[in-house]
C-alpha cells in the first residue's frame, strides 16, 4: 500500500472500520479526494476474519446481519461473497443460582426491551437504577444483568440509562438480527472495500497528532504528514487518547473519553464435527448468571457443513477471565457451559478465541457506552461538526447502532454532510 501523500486531500478519514470505509466510498463516489488512515494492519475495526487451517473462515469480531440490514446485504452481494443462514431453533437454557432452567422466550427480547422502550426517556442515573424499579424477582434481575452484560460488555451499574435507551430504541426489533453470516467472513468484505480504495487507503498508519494551520488539518503518522481540508474521525471514543490534539479548539477531546466505557468482551468460536445438541432442549441460546454476562449461541449453517457455537463473555464474565491464558479461559468456559449442553461440548474440532477487552485501537468489544451524565449526553458533541472536524462510528448511527449495518449508515450519513460543505 502506498503511504500518505504530500498533496492536500479534501477529507482525511481516521479509522477503517465499516464506518470509515463507508464514508470513504461515499465521499469518493461524490467526487471528493480522500485519504484513509488505519492504525491496524488491516481494515475492519471490530470486525476481523481469519482463515483457519481447517479451511474455514472464522469471525473473531462482528459476525451477524439480517434482511433489514440492507447495506450489509448489498455489500456482500456487490463484492461477490456468500451469504448463509444461521440456525436458530427454539430452546433457551439458563443457569440461574446453579440450577438449569428452560425459558420460553429470550428474556431480554420479551421483557427488558419492551419495558425499556415504554419507559420515561430522560431518567437520570444508571441502567441498574432503572432496572431495580421494575419490581422483578431475583431471577428476572439476574437475567437482565447477565443478558445486558453479554450485549453491552459492561456491568449495567456503569452505564447511563438515558444513553443506553436512546441507542437501543433505534432498533425495529432484536428477534432476528442473527439471521445471516458471511461464508468468507465480513472481515474479508472490509478488506475488499479497502482494496477498492487503492492508494487512498493506508494501513499501519496510526494518527499520532492532529493540528490546524492556515485553515487546514495536519495529521501526523509514522509514514509522514497528511494535509486535509476536512477530517472525519471514524473510531471509538477510547481511541481519542491515542492522538495529540494540538489545536486550541480541539482540547476538549483530550478528556472526552472519560465520559465513556468500552465493552469488555471475549469471543470463542467452537466448531464440532457434528451438532450433538440437536434434538435436545437447547435450541440456540444458553445464558448464566455465574459469571454474569456469558452466553453461548448456535451459529451453525442449517444446511450442514458448519456446526459451531459462539461463546460471548461480556462484562463480569470477561473480567473473570482477566490474566488467564487462552487455554485457561477455554477450560473455564467449558466448565461453565457443560451443565447447559452436556459433556460433548468439551470436544470441539476447532477453537478460535479473541479477547477484545482494552483493545488498543478499537477500545473494546463490541460497543462503547456513555457513563451516567447530568447535563449533556457525551455523544451529542460528536454528532456535530467542529470547524471541519466530523465524527462517525457505529454507535452514532441513525439505525442499528453498534452493529455493522449501523456503522455503514453512520459513515454514509457523515459523508453526505461533508460533501454538502465541500
Image (cartoon, grey):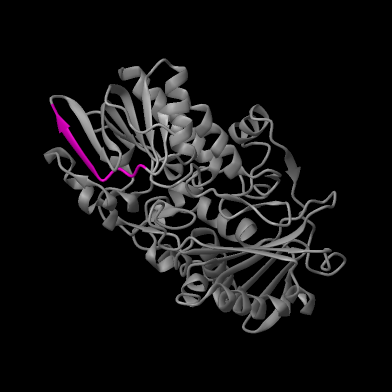
Q: Is residue 296 magenta?
A: no
Residue 24, position in %: x, y? 44, 28
Considering every residue shown, the one lying at the far top of the view is 31
Q: Residue drawn at (56%, 60%), measured in percent from left and top? A: 112
Residue 74, position in %: x, y? 63, 29
Q: How many marks?
A: 0
Please determine whether, in this image, residue 111 is positioned above or below residue 7.
Answer: below
Q: Which of 408 and 135 is in front in this view?
A: 408
Q: Which of 213 and 225 is in front in this view?
A: 225
The magenta segment? 205-213
The N terminus lies in quadrant = top left
Look at the image and tell me whether residue 198 can be seen.
Answer: yes
Considering every residue shown, the one lying at the far bottom of the view is 98
The C terminus lies in quadrant = top left
Q: Which of 26 and 225 is in front in this view?
A: 225
Residue 146 in the figure: left or right of residue 257: right
Please determine whether, in this image, residue 76 is positioned above or below residue 239.
Answer: above
Residue 76 in the figure: left or right of residue 263: right
Q: Residue drawn at (54%, 57%), measured in percent from left and top? A: 115
Q: Residue drawn at (25%, 47%), measured in percent from left and top? A: 243
Considering every residue shown, the one lying at the far right of the view is 279
Residue 31, position in %: x, y? 41, 15
Residue 389 figure quarter: top left
Residue 119, position in %: x, y? 48, 54
Please determine whether, in this image, residue 201 is positioned above or below residue 318.
Answer: above
Residue 164 figure quarter: bottom left
Q: Which of 20 and 408 is in front in this view?
A: 20
Look at the image and tell me whether residue 136 can be seen.
Answer: no
Amino acid at each position: 500500500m502506498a503511504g500518505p501523500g504530500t498533496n492536500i486531500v479534501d477529507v482525511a478519514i481516521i479509522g477503517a472500520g465499516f464506518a470509515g470505509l463507508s464514508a470513504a466510498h461515499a465521499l469518493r463516489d461524490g467526487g471528493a479526494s480522500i485519504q484513509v488512515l488505519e492504525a491496524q494492519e488491516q481494515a475492519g475495526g471490530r470486525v476481523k476474519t481469519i482463515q483457519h487451517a481447517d479451511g474455514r473462515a472464522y469471525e473473531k469480531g462482528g459476525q451477524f446481519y439480517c434482511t433489514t440490514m440492507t447495506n450489509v446485504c448489498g455489500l456482500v452481494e456487490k463484492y461477490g461473497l456468500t451469504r448463509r443462514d444461521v440456525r436458530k431453533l427454539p430452546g433457551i437454557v439458563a443457569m440461574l443460582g446453579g440450577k438449569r432452567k428452560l425459558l420460553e422466550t429470550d428474556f431480554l427480547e420479551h421483557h427488558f426491551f419492551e419495558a425499556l422502550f415504554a419507559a420515561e426517556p430522560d431518567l437520570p442515573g444508571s441502567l441498574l437504577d432503572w432496572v431495580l424499579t421494575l419490581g422483578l424477582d431475583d431471577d428476572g434481575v439476574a437475567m437482565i444483568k447477565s443478558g445486558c452484560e453479554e450485549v453491552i460488555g459492561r456491568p449495567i451499574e456503569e452505564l447511563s440509562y438515558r444513553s443506553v435507551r436512546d441507542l437501543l430504541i433505534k432498533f425495529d426489533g432484536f428477534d432476528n438480527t442473527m439471521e445471516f453470516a458471511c461464508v468468507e467472513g465480513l472481515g474479508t468484505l472490509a478488506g475488499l472495500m479497502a482494496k477498492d480504495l487503492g492508494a487512498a487507503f493506508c494501513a499501519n498508519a496510526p494518527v499520532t497528532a492532529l493540528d490546524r494551520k492556515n485553515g487546514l488539518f495536519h495529521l501526523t503518522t509514522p509514514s509522514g504528514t497528511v494535509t486535509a481540508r476536512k477530517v472525519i474521525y471514524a473510531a471509538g471514543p477510547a481511541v481519542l487518547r491515542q492522538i495529540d490534539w494540538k489545536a486550541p479548539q480541539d482540547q476538549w477531546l483530550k478528556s472526552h473519553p472519560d465520559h465513556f466505557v468500552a465493552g469488555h468482551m471475549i469471543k470463542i468460536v467452537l466448531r464440532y464435527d457434528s451438532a450433538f445438541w440437536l434434538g435436545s432442549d437447547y435450541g440456540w441460546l444458553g445464558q448464566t448468571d455465574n459469571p454474569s454476562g456469558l452466553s453461548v449461541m448456535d451459529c451453525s449453517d442449517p444446511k450442514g457443513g458448519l456446526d459451531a457455537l459462539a461463546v460471548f463473555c461480556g462484562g463480569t464474565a470477561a473480567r473473570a477471565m482477566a490474566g488467564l491464558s487462552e487455554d485457561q479461559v477455554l477450560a473455564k468456559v467449558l466448565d461453565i457451559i457443560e451443565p447447559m449442553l452436556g459433556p460433548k461440548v468439551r470436544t470441539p474440532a476447532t477453537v478460535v478465541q479473541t479477547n477484545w477487552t482494552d483493545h488498543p485501537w478499537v477500545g473494546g468489544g463490541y460497543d462503547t457506552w456513555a457513563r451516567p451524565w447530568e447535563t449533556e449526553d457525551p455523544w451529542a458533541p460528536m454528532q456535530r461538526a467542529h470547524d471541519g472536524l466530523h465524527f462517525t462510528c457505529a454507535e452514532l448511527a441513525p439505525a442499528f447502532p453498534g452493529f455493522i449495518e449501523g456503522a455503514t449508515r453512520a459513515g454514509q450519513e457523515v459523508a453526505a454532510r461533508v460533501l454538502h460543505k465541500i
